[in-house]
Image (cartoon, rainbow, N blue to C red):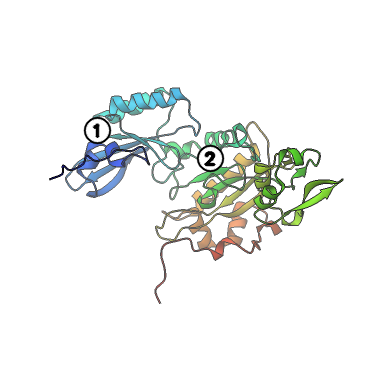
Amino acid sequence: MAATPAKRKTDIGPPHYEQFLPPVIKENFGKWKYHEIPRPGVLMHVAESGDKLWSVRAATPRLMSIETIRTFADLADKYCGGHLRFTSRNNVEFLVSEESNIDPLIADLKKENFPVGGMGASITNIVHTQGWVHCHSAASDASGVVKSVMDDLFPYFDGSQTLPAKLRIAFACCLNMCGAVHCSDIAILGVHRRAPEINHDVIGAQCEIPSTVSACPTGAIRPANVDGHESVEVIEERCMFCANCYTVCPAMTLNDPENDGLSIWVGGKVSNARHEPMFSKLAIPFLPNNPPRWPETVAAVRNLVEVYAANAKKYERMGEWIERIGWPQFFDLTGIEFTKYHIDDFKHAGETFKRSLHFKQS
């Protein structure tokens, strides 16, 4: 009789998540009874067996150094058996199984200048893209804007000021939106406002014309002959300033310090609770790039947060509040001017998309 072959190990795909779970989660997997927030930044999970696990959430930068990662690893080894995780909004959470370790962990985090908070009805970390630090198509910075906004809204993170429900803020440095700007309560989106400039002298050497033409999602780029050389032309009324062409063709530059800036969007969410997921919609078409602290953007976001906090019902997300009161009332309360840019006449407008797994029964 042939021996049973040993289970083959490969390096294909990620390792199974189970091997990284804390023992208390493994022992109570699928048997959790309830959870509650005993203090800002701490979530207590209670299992049917009576076992408890505390998630301690700290604010973290989106771009971290090796030293920061090592600091988190050392704290996890010291207080929670090496178990931590990062949320989808880039917060670090330490999974603590001993209640006595919570206070010293928070003290050490604060000593290292990582504040604890962002749990429940509050503002958590702003998820954001790379911005000027890395991305070639960025219309604005990411880290600088996010730092400025969160410095101003910090009391809503640490629990000093309360909100009706959780408020998720996102930032994307262009409309390719590597960030979650399409599904956040408040979203800051970098925008270009002019079509790409074509350097006809070098486009033949730097770019493949067919690839450049096919890169445009709206068909705004077409082959052209300029001074006897193969090049392209841009139909400006079709251009949506996405920089896809610049990605494949460096001779088509889009960045413009005079016209690039930021827009503000509101009302998106991922959760299915109370209402199916919602897409963000335009609130402010344009704000100028004004580094290093972006005062116009900071003031606009604070205004939205304060008006929402003063008028929404408990547990009501930003989009749900706007849907209840209506967009005219939203513009009146926030003092935002309604313009032609708020009219969504794009043929693939968000209202035509199904945003949930929920289907109506006939």
Q: Which residue is mark 2?
A: 128
Report the side of 276 relative to 18 (left or right): right
In the rendered image, the quadrant that contains the N terminus is top left
The quarter of the picture where residue 86 lies is: top left
In the rendered image, the quadrant that contains the C terminus is bottom left
The quarter of the picture where residue 140 lies is: top right
- The residue most toward the front is 1
Q: Kindly identify the residue that appears in the image at 41 percent across and 68 percent down.
A: 359
Residue flagged by tag 2: what amino acid is it?
A: His
On screen, residue 72 above or below 357:
above
Nearer-the-camera pick, 158 or 171: 171
Query: Dots 2 and 1: beta carbons under 8 Å?
Result: no
Packing grade of label 1 (10 A; few <14, some 14-19, many >=20) is: few
Q: Which residue is mark 1?
A: 99
- Comes first in the chain, label 2 or label 1: 1
**Residue 64 appearing in the image:** yes
**Residue 258 appearing in the image:** no
Helix, strand or loop at label 2? It is: strand
- The residue most toward the left is 1
**Cα–Cα span, label 2 and label 1:** 33 Å
